[in-house]
Amino acid sequence: MVKIAAMGDNVVDCYLARGEMYPGGNCLNVSVYVSRFGGQSAYVGAIGRDRAGDLIQAALSSERVDISQLRRLDGPTAYCVVGHRDADRIFLTFDLGVSMFTPNRQDLDFLSGFQAAHIGQSSGLDAWVPKISTKSLVSYDFSTRRDPEHRYSIGRHCYLASVSGDGLDDEQSDAIASELLACGSKWVLVTRGRAGALLRSHSFSYRTPARLVQPIDTLGAGDTFIARTLFGLLRREAPEDILGQAAEAAAATCQYFGAVGHAAVIDLGAITSEILLRARRLQDETV
């Protein structure tokens, strides 16, 4: 049984056009996808004592994700107001709420029971990555952050380093992957949207094309790719098979609204009508 814990960010993604909110956030998404792929999954994070927090907790429980280390704190659950242009998302405004937290000894000891721990760069946990790497293999999502000093400080602790490379060409993708491998990462994944993905180690390099579909919503596709890649590496699957499965899974995520589904009516208790009105104006300006 593959066992992966995700520690860090969560959010409710609020879709203006639909009046609905969906559980999300890189680390939360990875925990859900790992469970869907057949792994034993856990999520470590913090949510508020509000309806958005209720939605996240219920969704994780229904997806068979271990939430024994999920905190419920006074204050709002993190949210992001999302607009759309065709199927592509536009992030309009956000509030981190109570999602930024400091791991305690119990959290770190908990990670020792898993083969890998996934962390995202938006989780505010960079200072804890060295310690976490002594408890479990580290999967880290650099997302679109690309400064070399940050790559070196984190990449040397990574089993899997993932980079969002949409807009990068082959040469640029290879250069970033080479830097991460040189500083100590064992595997590097660069996802490039419709341009496919690259998976590299010191002895292996493989590219796969994207599985092109007519998307309903692209939110969560990159997180799906990361989760399936990490899952496959820990199962010792052939790298080319891993990328093929990951591309198929990411394409499937684009076929429904929200990163993991579980829609609910937007909670105006945490997100005021004034904020939603401002977000609608921002969306109108970007279209």
Image (cartoon, helix red, strand yellow):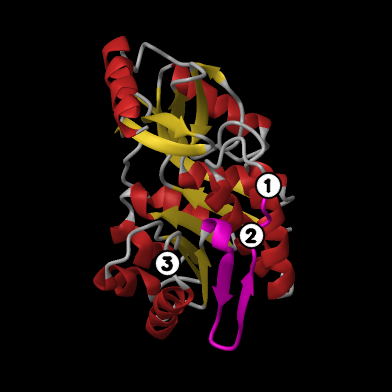
Q: Which residues are magenta?
A: 193-213
Query: Do the CB atoms of the residues marked 3 and 2 lie less than 8 Å apart?
Result: no
- Quadrant showing the N terminus: bottom right
Q: Identify the residue shown where x is 31% and y is 59%.
A: 126
Could you say whether the residue bearing mark 2 is in a helix, strand or loop? loop
Q: Is residue 200 magenta?
A: yes
Instruction: Give the percent coordinates (x, y) of residue 147.
Output: 27, 67
Instruction: Give the percent coordinates (x, y) of residue 110.
Output: 51, 52
To which residue does mark 2 refer?
210
**Mark 3 surroundings: few (<14), some (14-19) or many (≥20) residues within 10 A:** some
Q: How many marks?
A: 3
Which amino acid, by three-letter code, is at mark 3? Leu
The answer to whether any part of residue 101 appears in the image is: yes
To which residue does mark 3 refer?
168
To which residue does mark 1 refer?
213
Tell which residue pokes out farthest to the bottom in this image. Answer: 203
**Mark 2 surroundings: few (<14), some (14-19) or many (≥20) residues within 10 A:** many
- Quadrant showing the C terminus: top left
Q: Identify the residue shown where x is 36% and y is 11%.
A: 269
